[in-house]
């Protein structure tokens, strides 16, 4: 039986892997997102200052070797949600004509749905969707590692546990989305690796590997 990694939950971040990542890159992504989350939390309130929080998050990733496409963070867009957020995320990938991302998200969300500790942690860290991130990761043809950061803020009248899979009625839920795209410069990260290790020894967030069981 093959237990393939489909993604990762750590703090308010849900990472989804498009194709299989090496264990080394899996750990680097987890560690970089850990440090970016802590830095953003230190400088800004995660829920009341989401734009500043996200900018600090991206700044920290850039410090540890992630290059921002065109130096740009995309402005927020607002969406009404009808049905589940899980379906919304998959359909959004389909709308971008990215079938690989859509299929990877399906695998990641399926494994998250059956992982109660990961789901409970994600509910808690995001205040049931008030502020969370979905982060697809993939290699390009040259083996470079890329991530898309989707910063999402759910606004509802009544919060729900397992919010990603709740069937929201029309006009009862809206979503603000910010996004950025980055590529990892491994040499730049290696130059910061000693500092990264030191920072991680001070405090780390819990992480939950998401695995798809294949016979």
Image: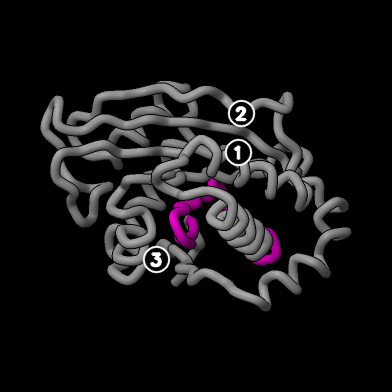
Residue drawn at point x = 39 percent, y = 50 percent:
107
Report the disc number at residue 125. none
Q: Which residue is mark 3?
A: 213
Q: Is residue 26 visible?
A: no
Range of magenta residues = 7-25
Counting other residues with Cα less than 10 Å from the Cα at mark 3, is it few (<14), some (14-19), or many (20 or more)?
few
The residue under the point 49% across, 68% down is 207
Q: State which mark lies toward you, 1 or 3.
A: 1
Residue 184 horizontal/vertical position (percent):
74, 46
Q: Is residue 48 above or below residue 175?
A: below
Task: Please give the label number shown on residue 73.
Answer: 2
- Name the foreground residue: 3 vs 37: 37
Q: Nearer the viewer, residue 166 or 77?
A: 77
Question: Which is more N-terminal, label 3 or label 2?
Answer: 2
Label 2 crowd (10 A; few <14 / some 14-19 / many >=20): some
Q: Mark 2 or mark 3: which is in front?
A: 2
- Which residue is disc 1 drawn over? 55
- The reply, left or right, for residue 181 in relation to residue 190 is left
In 3D space, how far apart are the residues under numbered discs 2 and 1 (Cα atoms)? Answer: 8 Å
The spot of residue 171 in percent (x, y) is 15, 25
The color scheme shown is one colour
Q: Residues within 10 Å of mark 1 (few under 14, many from 20)?
A: some
In space, the residues marked 2 and 3 are separated at their CA atoms by 36 Å
């Amino acid at each position: 039986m093959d237990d393939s990694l489909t993604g990762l939950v750590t703090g308010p971040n849900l990472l989804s892997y498009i194709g299989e990542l090496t264990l080394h890159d899996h750990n680097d992504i987890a560690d970089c997102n850990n440090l970016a989350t802590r830095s953003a939390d230190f400088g800004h309130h995660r829920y009341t200052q989401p734009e500043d929080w996200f900018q600090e998050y991206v700044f920290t990733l850039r410090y540890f070797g992630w290059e921002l496409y065109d130096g740009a963070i995309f402005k927020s867009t607002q969406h009404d949600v009808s049905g589940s957020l899980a379906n919304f995320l998959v359909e959004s990938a389909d709308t971008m004509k990215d079938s690989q991302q859509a299929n990877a998200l399906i695998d990641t969300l399926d494994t998250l749905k059956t992982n109660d500790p990961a789901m409970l942690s994600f509910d808690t860290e995001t205040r049931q969707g008030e502020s969370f991130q979905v982060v697809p990761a993939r290699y390009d043809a040259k083996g470079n590692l890329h991530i898309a950061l989707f910063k999402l803020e759910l606004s509802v009248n009544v919060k729900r546990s397992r919010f990603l899979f709740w069937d929201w009625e029309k006009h009862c839920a809206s979503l603000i989305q910010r996004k950025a795209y980055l590529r990892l410069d491994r040499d730049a990260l290696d130059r910061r690796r000693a500092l990264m290790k030191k920072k991680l020894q001070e405090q780390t967030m819990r992480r939950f590997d998401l695995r798809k069981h294949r016979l």
